[in-house]
Image: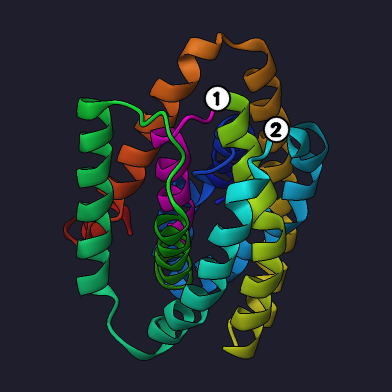
Amino acid sequence: MLVAALLAGTVRGYTGFGSAMIFMPVAGAYLGPKAAIGIMSIIDAVLQFAMLRSSWRHARWGEIGPLFVGYVVGLPIGVWLLVTIDPTPVRWITSASILLVLTALLTVGRIEASPGRVATVSTGIVSGLISGLASLGGMVLSLFWLAGPSHNAGVRGSSVAFFVPASVISISLLALAGIYTSEVIRIAAWTILPYGLGVGLGSLLFEKASPRLFRPVAFAVIAAAALTSLPMLDRLLR
């Protein structure tokens, strides 16, 4: 889990998203999905502030507002589903949808115009729903920004800026749902150091690596997240 936290932080520091893809399967294998989401929410909420200073000015604030409105609507529904129903069918739909959109983006290419208000709010709702249920809402937002006119720093900065207020709401709802047990808090305290080291390493790689690498890496992270979240791989990954 410490190694997974280090790798997850590195991905988060470089792309601005994707840490749950690495950490959730490992933590979920030992502790279950509820505890894994609790740990992920704590360590990511603390360390994202370290990324905020360098990425804040690149965020696309005109889109973050409507996205956040939708996110606030969808997140409580996702958390409620997490604690009340079998998430397997939703996971199938989520993974398949992410792969479908990613395939379309790779085939068609970017859209030069920014999406309308309805599409933006709807994307926020879907992201909130999936964040509460499977902690993969960041993939939805990343696809949204990668599909539009955002440059590399804009995609990364928007992801970081969005999840600062989103994490406050997410943590509050998870706390009300009883996710934060003493075990969750104890393990979060152990994993936050390697996660922070990873965030620092990933941020350094973003500054030093060729800009042409960003989008291929981002697409690879999204594809890997969707594939590793498929229920048929649970026996291998969880």
Q: Identify the colour scheme used.
A: rainbow
Query: For the image shown, how many numbered marks are present on the structure?
Result: 2
Task: Tell me, yes or no, if residue 146 can be seen here.
Answer: yes
Farthest residue, direction top? 210
Left or right of 55? Residue 221 is: left
Q: Name the residue at 44% across, 31% down.
A: 218
Residue 168: quarter of image: bottom right
> Mark 1: which amino acid?
His
Bounds of the magenta segment: 135-150
Residue 193, given in percent of the width and then of the height, sits at 75, 46
Q: Secondary structure at mark 2?
A: helix
Residue 176, given in percent of the width and then of the height, sits at 63, 89
Marked residue nearer the N-terminal end (2 or 1)? 2
Farthest residue, direction right? 53
- Residue 114 image label: none
Q: As displayed, is residue 197 above or below residue 188?
A: above
Does residue 138 belong to the magenta stretch? yes
Residue at image mark 1: 151
> Is there CB contact under 8 Å for labels 2 and 1?
yes
Q: Secondary structure at mark 1?
A: loop
- Tell me how far mark 2 sits from mark 1, CA to CA: 9 Å
Q: Name the residue at 42% across, 61% down.
A: 118
Q: Along the line of sight, which residue is nearer the eye, 93 or 22?
A: 93
Residue 95: quarter of image: bottom left
Left or right of 121? Residue 161 is: right
Q: As displayed, is residue 214 above or below residue 1?
A: above
Residue at image mark 2: 58
